[in-house]
Amino acid sequence: MNDSIRYCSNPICSKEIKGFGNNPQPFLNLKIEETVCNSCNEIFVIPERMGEPMSKFAMLLLNGFKKQ
Ligand SMILES: [Zn+2]
């Protein structure tokens, strides 16, 4: 068993990753070694990969983060 805990590479999330995690590319130009959790994968990564505009919800999250 590998006991090392990984955390979501999305700076506005940083949750502990359960399971394998997800390749974050191309979201935020993260490296392939980075990992995002399942929710970030669904909200941010998949839409970006499909070339869809980021959802309003995702924009709000990111904008809130940048203001801090
Ligand atoms: Zn996450």
Image: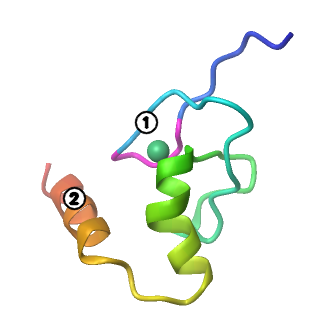
Comparing marks 1 and 2, which lies closer to the viewer? 1
Mark 1 and mark 2 lie on one chain; the one further toward the N terminus is 1
Residue bearing mark 1: 14
Q: 18 above or below 46?
A: above
Q: Is residue 25 left or right of residue 52?
A: right
Disc 1 to disc 2, C-alpha distance? 15 Å
Q: Residues within 10 Å of mark 2 (few under 14, many from 20)?
A: few
Q: Is residue 62 left or right of residue 60?
A: right
Q: Amino acid at mark 2?
A: Lys
The answer to which quarter of the image holds residue 2 is top right
The residue shown at (74%, 9%) is: 3
Nearer to me, 67 or 55: 55
Query: Mark 1 vs ligand 1: CB under 8 Å?
Result: yes
Q: 1 above or below 54?
A: above
The answer to which quarter of the image holds residue 51 is bottom right
Q: Is residue 12 visible?
A: yes
The residue shown at (62%, 27%) is: 6
Is 9 within the magenta? yes
Query: Under tag 1, what secondary structure?
Result: loop
Residue bearing mark 2: 66
Q: Which residues are magenta?
A: 8-12
The residue shown at (14%, 48%) is: 68
